[in-house]
């Protein structure tokens, strides 16, 4: 619908009122299940595969899930990264499925191996280096769709400086995201409340960058601590409440023992689940899915979801959500249903 100039409210208001109901229908029609076998097949001949993204028809608007393959360092592709790598106004949580190597995030090195996690805070320069002889593979969730939706997704890559928007050429790019490398807020007349409030706004990006550089980055798979909750045994991996400078994404791993079930719940934030190991059944509202290692489930907003382990080994689910983003918007409502039986 395109208008030129002001319009009477009846043209637009009823559409707003209808929106919630229309959205329920779109949630209902959203695809949910992505087969791990299909992903593996595509990954044989591609460097990466998207499993969930709104551009693929999913009603999930705030984050995506994909796998990427990193070739060994001696391969030509990887030599293109020199110093900075790339950065984006998008948060990312990476889980290494295979291989070993290290990541440079904001100039610091973090060594990882299969099973480990790397949290890339928003706008931190980063690059990943494969130290093995086989491809290193990670599954990652990023908040790209959220930031594209608000017109703020910026990807800057050292190989393509012609597309840089905020970065400065040369040394400044290494140290700061502030154009011109501003180190401090403009002083102004510090006497008034308004002057102080405004100076804080000017200083925000600088202060935010200092906070970002104090963020935790690496989580070892061996460090995961599973603790009982109403949803079952859950290990919090990346969350702003446990030392990560992250505003939109949250990552947990849930483990359901053989023959047991998780809790059931529903909530107003997007969630994408990836089966790390085992097999089982997942109920999402009135649909059931047989799942195994490598499968992905895009849980629609406010859909009830619950897992059952029907296999012979623990069922482990990697769950990324944008709960923190929604909490910051005051949009969180979680209903707990049946509780886990373990
Ligand atoms: Fe990245
Ligand atoms: Fe959930």
Image (cartoon, grey):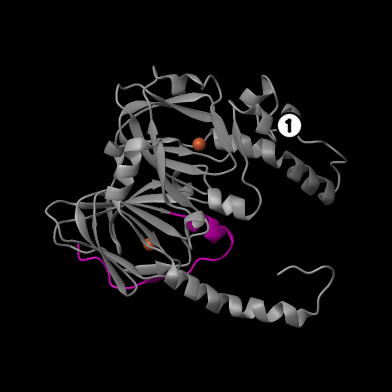
Give the left or right position of residue 17, taking residue 203 as reference.
Answer: left
Q: Quadrant holding ligand 2? A: bottom left
Residue lying farthest to the right in this orientation: 189
Give x and y (percent) for residue 265.
36, 68
Residue lying farthest to the front in this orientation: 45
Residue 125 visible, this angle: no
Residue ID at (88%, 41%): 189
The magenta stretch spans residue 65: no
Residue ID at (62%, 23%): 174
Q: Does the residue labelled 1 lie within 8 Å of ligand 1?
A: no
Q: In this view, does 143 lie above or below 230?
A: above
> To which quarter of the image does residue 118 belong?
top left
Image quadrant where one finds the N terminus: bottom right
Residue lying farthest to the left in this orientation: 312
Residue 19 visible, this angle: yes
Q: Is residue 337 above or below residue 275?
A: below
What residue range appears in magenta?
321-342
Give x and y (percent) for residue 143.
52, 49
Label 1 packing within 10 angstroms: few (<14), some (14-19), many (20+): few
Give x and y (percent) for residue 164.
67, 33
| SS assignment at label 1 | helix
Total numbered circles: 1
Q: Is residue 68 above or below residue 169?
A: below
- Along the line of sight, which residue is nearer the eye, 208 or 9? 9
The magenta stretch spans residue 341: yes
Residue where numbered disc 1 is placed: 179
Give the left or right position of residue 14, taking residue 83 as reference.
Answer: right
Image quadrant where one finds the C terminus: bottom left
Residue ID at (39%, 37%): 46
> To which quarter of the image does residue 21 belong?
bottom right
Give x and y (percent) for residue 315.
21, 53
- Along the line of sight, which residue is nearer the eye, 52 or 152? 52
């Amino acid at each position: 619908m395109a208008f030129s100039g002001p319009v009477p409210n009846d043209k637009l208001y009823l559409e707003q009122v209808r929106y919630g109901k229309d959205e329920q229908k779109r949630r209902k029609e959203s695809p949910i299940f992505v087969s791990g076998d299909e992903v593996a097949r595509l990954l044989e001949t591609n460097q990466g595969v998207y499993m969930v993204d709104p551009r693929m028809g999913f009603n999930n608007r705030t984050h995506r899930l994909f796998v990427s393959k990193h070739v060994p360092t001696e391969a030509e592709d990887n030599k293109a990264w020199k110093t900075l790598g790339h950065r984006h106004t998008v948060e990312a949580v990476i889980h290494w499925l295979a291989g070993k190597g290290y990541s440079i995030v904001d100039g610091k090195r973090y060594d990882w191996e299969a099973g480990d996690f790397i949290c890339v805070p928003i706008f931190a320069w980063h690059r990943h280096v494969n130290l093995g002889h086989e491809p290193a593979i990670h599954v990652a969730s990023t908040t790209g769709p959220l930031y594209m939706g608000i017109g703020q997704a910026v990807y800057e890559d050292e190989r393509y400086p012609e597309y840089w928007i905020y970065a400065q050429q040369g040394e400044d790019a290494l140290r700061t995201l502030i154009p011109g490398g501003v180190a401090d807020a403009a002083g102004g007349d510090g006497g008034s409340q308004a002057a102080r409030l405004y100076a804080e706004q000017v200083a925000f990006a600088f202060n935010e960058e200092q906070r970002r550089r104090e963020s935790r980055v690496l989580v070892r798979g061996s460090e995961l601590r599973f603790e009982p909750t109403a949803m079952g045994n859950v290990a919090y991996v990346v969350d702003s409440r446990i030392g990560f400078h992250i505003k939109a994404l949250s990552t947990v791993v849930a483990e359901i023992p053989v023959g047991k079930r998780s809790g059931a719940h529903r909530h107003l934030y997007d969630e994408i689940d990836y089966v790390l190991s085992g097999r089982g059944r997942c109920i999402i509202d009135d649909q059931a899915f047989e799942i195994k290692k490598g499968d992905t489930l895009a849980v629609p907003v406010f859909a009830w979801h619950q897992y059952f382990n029907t296999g012979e080994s623990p069922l482990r689910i990697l769950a990324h959500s944008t709960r923190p983003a929604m909490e910051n918007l005051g949009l969180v409502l979680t209903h707990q249903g049946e509780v886990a039986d373990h």
